[in-house]
């Protein structure tokens, strides 16, 4: 019997594992037509015994070259130092398998156990190395566990023919879906979705703004839209507790003012709306981590675990990037490490990650206060790592500030400020104001400004459209599903959801 290699540490005293592998190899040689299904399910490392692994590798190479998997061809390619002629004859003489799928599943299970056993040995060795800190060890182990649990394997170079076939299939799939503009997670804002096609797998999306512009609100509106499409969302809130986030979402969802919800001043109709909204949200997969101080290592660990337990997590949001901890003393290098780590994590988990970001204060001194890429705070690497960069701008924030300063200045000078105060009062009492999402970077599309409307009372961004148009819009299935469950007509589902 061939000897187990260095990682095959499980006891195989009765030869069970060796026979299991041998029967699968025998089945391939007996009926090569089944190999196309097997090659996607098994890898070379799943075979612990060198002889079986060697034959499997030969079959893989023949398959990739388009050559037949024939007993004589395989025999001629054998390395006699690994597989003797007697061993090869014994494999060919193995009994045919009836339920191949069950045998493959069992072999995969044994392979995973070997990997976990090997990982335990690595963990034991690393924990004894004084130079390695605990965060580094945990990051290494958790990444490996995630790879094992999701069967992530290292990919080799891909040939042009394979890439073209994959791309063509993707285009045909999009065509089959009805030429939809949105291919990723929809934002809920029509014009923004047209520019970005939604947020796609592996995207790192940065939403930058100065304080008081509403970047958290914009992110929550996007989260609500994803939830309404039954997309699971994970949020890391480093600034605000989960309860405050939920108050904002409920205000937006019910059209009850945030201030009323905060003080509990609700009439019976509003209580009905709130109850229905809570029941609606209860069914959604929304997970919030509001621990506060969080580093990229801890964030990766938490998100990997959550994603492995909840595969429907298809969007992650971080509020906000500059509050994350780094591992060094140079803040620019720390932010570079964080932004690069988020981009790598987005690709690893195959989900878009939205990270909110503060902008440099220097833009306040400019006449034109619309943000530009150089306003990203603390690190130029954010611009390099991001696939999409959105800036949120509301002119009214600056107009209000300038008006208040002018009133103070003219009051001190003894001038009449009644007209200025009336203008400020009108501004404060207005129900909505214009907003702008500036698409400053879009790796796979155009860059342009997208106008939105900001509803102050319920802290909600809306499509720039007439109220009549928005009232007639019935495009999202989430609203239909909700109505079909007869949860009542009291909830007002905004159209951009």
Image (cartoon, rainbow, N blue to C red):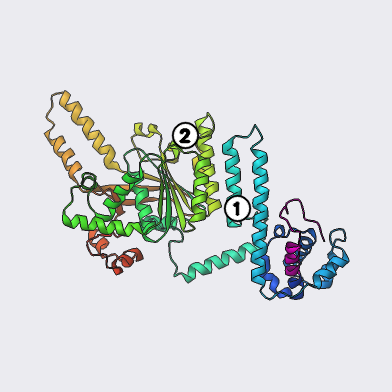
Q: How crowded is mark 2: few (under 14 residues within 10 Å), some or many (20 or more)?
A: some
Q: Which of 359 and 21 is in front in this view?
A: 21
The reply to whether residue 41 is visible in this rendering is no
Please name the residue that numbered disc 2 is placed on. 378
Q: In which quarter of the image is the N terminus?
A: bottom right
Image location of residue 247, percent across then percent down: 29, 48
Total marks shown come to 2
The residue singled out by tag 1 in the image is 147
Q: Mark 1 to mark 2: distance in Å?
A: 32 Å
Q: Residue 82 carries which label?
A: none
Q: Which of marks 1 and 2 is nearer the N terminus?
A: 1
Indicate whether residue 320 is drawn in magenta. Answer: no
Left or right: residue 83 compared with residue 186: right
Magenta part of the chain: 1-25
- Residue sitting at 77 percent across and 56 percent down? 4
Q: How crowded is mark 1: few (under 14 residues within 10 Å), some or many (20 or more)?
A: some
Give the left or right position of residue 87, taking residue 176 as reference: right
């Amino acid at each position: 019997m061939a000897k187990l290699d260095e990682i095959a540490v499980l006891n195989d005293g009765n030869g069970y594992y060796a026979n299991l592998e041998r029967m699968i190899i025998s089945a391939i040689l007996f009926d090569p037509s089944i190999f196309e299904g097997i090659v996607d399910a098994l890898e070379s490392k799943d075979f612990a015994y060198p002889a079986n692994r060697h034959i499997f590798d030969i079959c893989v190479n023949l398959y990739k070259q388009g050559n037949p998997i024939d007993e004589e061809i395989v025999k001629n390619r054998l390395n006699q130092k690994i597989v003797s002629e007697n061993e090869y004859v014994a494999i060919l003489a193995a009994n045919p398998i009836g339920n191949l799928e069950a045998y493959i599943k069992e072999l995969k299970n044994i392979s995973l156990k070997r990997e976990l056993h090997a990982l335990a040995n690595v963990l034991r060795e690393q924990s004894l190395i004084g130079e390695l800190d605990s965060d580094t060890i945990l990051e290494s182990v958790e990444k490996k566990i995630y790879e094992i649990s999701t069967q992530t394997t290292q990919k080799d170079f891909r040939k042009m023919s394979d890439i073209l076939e994959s791309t063509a299939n993707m285009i045909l799939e999009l065509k089959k879906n009805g030429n939809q503009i949105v291919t990723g997670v929809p934002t809920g804002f029509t014009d923004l979705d047209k520019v970005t096609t939604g947020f796609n797998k592996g995207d790192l999306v940065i939403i930058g703004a100065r304080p008081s512009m509403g970047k958290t609100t914009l992110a929550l509106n996007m989260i609500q839209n994803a939830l309404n499409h039954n997309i699971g969302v994970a949020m890391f809130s480093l600034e605000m507790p989960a309860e405050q986030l939920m108050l904002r979402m409920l205000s937006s969802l019910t059209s009850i003012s945030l201030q009323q919800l905060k003080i509990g001043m609700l009439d019976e109709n509003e209580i009905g709306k709130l109850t229905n909204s809570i029941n609606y949200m209860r069914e959604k997969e929304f997970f919030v981590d509001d621990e506060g101080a969080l580093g990229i290592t801890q964030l990766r660990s938490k998100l990997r675990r959550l994603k492995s337990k909840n595969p429907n997590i298809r969007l992650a949001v971080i509020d906000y990037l500059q509050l994350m901890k780094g591992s060094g003393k140079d803040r620019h290098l720390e932010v570079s490490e964080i932004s690069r780590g988020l981009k790598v994590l987005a690709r690893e988990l195959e989900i878009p990650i939205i990270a909110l970001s503060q902008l440099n204060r220097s833009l306040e001194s400019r006449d034109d206060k619309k943000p530009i890429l150089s306003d990203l705070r603390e690190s130029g690497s954010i611009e390099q790592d991001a696939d999409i960069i959105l800036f949120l701008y509301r002119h009214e924030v600056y107009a209000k500030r300038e008006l208040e300063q002018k009133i103070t200045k003219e009051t001190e000078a003894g001038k009449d400020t009644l007209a200025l105060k009336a203008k400020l009062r009108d501004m404060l009492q207005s129900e909505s104001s214009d907003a702008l999402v500036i698409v400053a970077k879009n790796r796979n599309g155009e860059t342009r400004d997208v106008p939105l409307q900001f509803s102050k009372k319920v802290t909600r961004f809306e499509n720039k459209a007439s109220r009549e148009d928005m009232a007639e819009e019935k495009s999202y299935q989430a609203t239909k599903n909700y109505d079909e469950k007869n949860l009542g007509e009291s909830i007002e589902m905004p159209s951009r959801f």
